[in-house]
Image (cartoon, rainbow, N blue to C red):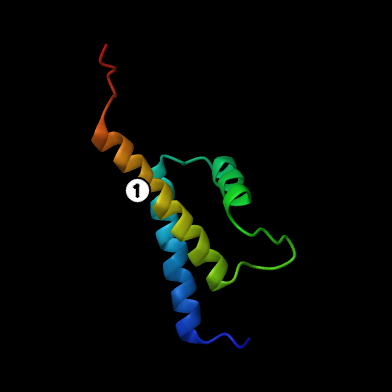
């Protein structure tokens, strides 16, 4: 695949968005970021991530943030006896 300037810009934007999502998730330590990526992305140590790899990770992060927001919005659950 031939990389174009537009693709490079999209990769930079995806990386920027991923960094922002890490902050929203409260993940600030580099080791925590590496662990999160290894659990949630297609990790290939021999190659750089593709735009699709980055977008897939970003999608997973957004789903996790959405589920965390739903839990926060609902608040604690109380049992009725």
Count of marks, rendered view: 1
Q: Which residue shows up at 49% across the image and 81% down it? A: 7
Residue at the extreme top of the image, as rendered: 81
- Please state which of residues 55 and 73 is positioned toward the viewer in this rendering: 73
Q: Which residue shows up at 65% across the image and 68% down it? A: 48
Q: Which residue shows up at 46% across the image and 70% down it? A: 12
Residue at the extreme front of the image, as rendered: 81
> Where residue 31 sits in the image (x, y, percent)?
59, 41
- Please state which of residues 78 and 24 is positioned toward the viewer in this rendering: 78
| Residue 49 placement: quadrant | bottom right
> Where residue 70 sits in the image (x, y, percent)?
30, 41
Residue 52 sits above or below residue 61 on the image: below
Secondary structure at numbered mark 1: helix
| Residue 35 placement: quadrant | top right
Residue 34 sits above or below residue 71 on the image: below
In the picture, measured across the screen, residue 79 lies left or right of residue 7, that is left
In the picture, measured across the screen, residue 48 lies left or right of residue 52, that is right
What residue did someone put label 1 on? 66
Residue 33 sits above or below residue 18 on the image: above
Residue 28 seen from this side? yes
In the picture, measured across the screen, residue 72 lies left or right of residue 3, that is left
Quadrant of the rendering where the N terminus is positioned: bottom right
> Where residue 18 sits in the image (x, y, percent)?
45, 57
Q: Which residue shows up at 59% across the image and 71% down it? A: 50
Quadrant of the rendering where the C terminus is positioned: top left
């Amino acid at each position: 695949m031939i990389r174009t300037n537009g693709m490079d810009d999209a990769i930079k934007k995806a990386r920027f968005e991923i960094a922002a999502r890490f902050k929203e998730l409260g993940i600030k330590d580099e080791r925590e970021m590496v662990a999160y990526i290894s659990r949630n992305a297609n990790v290939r140590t021999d190659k750089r991530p593709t735009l699709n790899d980055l977008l897939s990770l970003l999608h997973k992060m957004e789903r996790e943030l959405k589920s965390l927001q739903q839990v926060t919005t609902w608040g604690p659950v109380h049992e009725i006896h």
